[in-house]
Amino acid sequence: MMRRQQGGSVSAIELMVVLGITAVLSTVALPSYREQVVRLRRAEAQAVLLSLMQQQERYASRHNTFIAFSADSTDADAQQFRWWSGKDPAASAYEIEGKACDGEQISACIQLLAKPGTHRVDPQFKDPECGQLTLTSTGDRQALGPAQRCWQ
């Protein structure tokens, strides 16, 4: 007598094993995925800061001064500078601002600030490792977070 195979039935134990493996993988993979997303968004902001600094250097070579800019800029020259880090403000993780270096005139030094997760960009984005990124026209690169190697 031949035994017929049952097709398509899954026992409760097999289902529980699959669910358990899925839960373990999710617990391990999700934090790693989130960390990679933060690093990717941070690298995107750093690339934009470097590009904006080149744009500021070109502006300064023509006008003998840097120019401050932000999302609120009304000056036509200042509006040439992008204040977000992604493809558009809604898809960005960092809001960018250009202002005079601390204790300096704008004609001598500019600092570009990339602030994570403001109300103008993705407010849910956080970068607890590095926080705000700063790039100055003197080449100084800093981060406000506790991590030491945010610009590497």
Image (cartoon, rainbow, N blue to C red):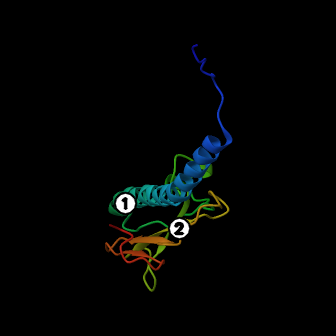
In the displayed structure image, the side of residue 61 where residue 97 appears, left or right: right
Q: Residue furthest bottom?
A: 103
Residue 81 point in image, percent of width and height = 49, 56
Q: Is mark 2 on a helix, strand or loop?
A: loop
Q: Position of residue 90 (x, y in %)?
A: 62, 50
Which residue is at 53% across, 72% downward?
128
Task: Name the foreground residue: 25 vs 1.
Answer: 1
Q: Quadrant of the N terminus?
A: top right
Which mark is in front, 2 or 1? 2
- Identify the residue at image location x=48%, y=59%: 32
Looking at the image, residue 141 lies above or below residue 122? below
Q: What residue type is labelled 1?
A: Leu
Q: Residue 127 carries which label?
A: 2
Give x and y (percent) for residue 137.
35, 71
Residue designated by label 1: 50
In the structure shown, which secondary structural element does the residue marked by tag 1 occupy? helix
Labels in figure, total = 2
